[in-house]
Amino acid sequence: MNQAQPKPARGGISIRNVSKVYDPEKTSVAAVLDCSIEIAPGELHVICGPSGCGKTTLLNAIAGFHSITSGEIYLDGELLCGPGKPQATPGADRVVVFQNGALFPWKTVLDNITYGPIIQGRMSKEEARDIARDKMVMAGLSGLEGCYPGELSSGMSRRVEIVRALVNDPAVLLLDEPFRGMDDLTKSIMHESLLEIYDQTQVTFFLITHDVEEAVFLGSKVSVMTTRPGRIKESIAVDIPRPRDYRVLTTEGFRGLMAEVVEVVHDEAQKAFEAGEREIA
Ligand code: ADP
Ligand code: MG
């Protein structure tokens, strides 16, 4: 098991009273309402909530993919968006790992990973390759530099996508249901793999899921969102020491925390079900 790195003094996110109304002039969908979350630098913060409660909306606001209607979001004390600046500027300090983050099938793994920083002129080819190789070792991907995405398993592809994000040296990694659609066994391998990567980086992880076991196994803190319009119903600290491995899953402490989170999520899931909420993506 790899040694955990000391956590950094960057990557703190402060979400203050954020609301987001889609299409305010016409259909007016209040997706997020007066939502506040404090995320400490280097934390693995999980947002857990039923379908359609506004999780992706929140992540997209941090990433700068769309505006917020009111409230403020700060990264390390700097305003990302708020009054006078409704939309954050997307930047390499906040990188999104997409659910089906398409890798270029015609490029090798190494070229996929280094493509962004090279094309954006932020790194020389050599520099990008050096950093990429280091991160690939960390993620258990060494030896795959010359492979093409079509030769990789879904788990390996996801790791390549995470490494591709980390090459940018972000303060925050934004992960929107990164293991959705994977079979349970692959998923459990991916959980451990993600934790190993997390333990070795100095990056804040903001991870969305509606899987309670995943939330508790991975998270330093789990914030449960209410059904739409989403706000935080409760934030639960997961005081299970790291590094964590699958054996944690059967411990009494883990089951107790899961029961606590399930209790909070279940009510909201019921309400979402009754309201017929569904996810767009
Ligand atoms: P989650 O990720 O928690 O499933 P989303 O943030 O995707 O939820 O969506 C929250 C709510 O906002 C849902 O009711 C969804 O239908 C609605 N919504 C999302 N995107 C748009 C959009 N572009 N226009 C109108 N409504 C939207
Ligand atoms: Mg979503």
Image: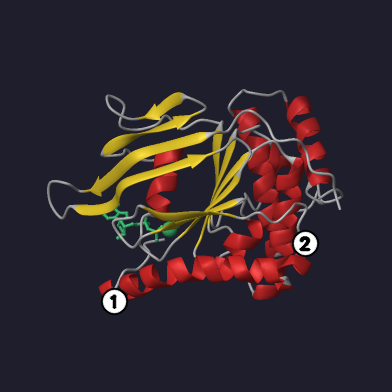
Q: Residue at x 35, y 52 (%)?
A: 231
Which residue in the structure is indicated by mark 2? 245
Note whether ligand 1 is within 8 Å of mark 1.
Answer: no
1 or 2: tag closer to the N-terminus:
2
Q: SS of the residue at dot 2?
A: loop
Residue appearing at x 41%, y 38% in the figure: 15
User: Does label 2 point to a residue whose CB lies under 8 Å from ligand 2?
Assistant: no
Asked if disc 1 and disc 2 are in contact, CB closer than 8 Å, the reply is no
Across and down, in percent, residue 107 comes to: 69, 46
Quadrant location of ligand 1? bottom left
Give percent across and percent down for residue 43. Answer: 61, 43
Q: Does residue 108 appear in the picture of this structure? A: no
- Tell me the crowding category of disc 1: few under 14, some 14 to 19, or many 20 or more residues within 10 angstroms, Cα based: few
Residue 236, percent from left and from top = 53, 55
Residue 189 occupies which quadrant of the picture? bottom right
The CA span between labels 1 and 2 is 36 Å
Q: Residue 27: which quarter of the image?
A: bottom left
Amino acid under label 2? Asp
In the rendered view, tell whether residue 251 sits above or below residue 133: below
Amino acid bearing label 1: Glu
Give 115 or 133, whichever is nearer the viewer.
133
Question: In the figure, 272 relative to 113: above or below?
Answer: below
Q: Quadrant of the C terminus?
A: bottom left
Query: In the picture provided, is 243 more to the left or to the right than 43?
Result: right
Which residue lies under the disc numbered 1?
Answer: 274
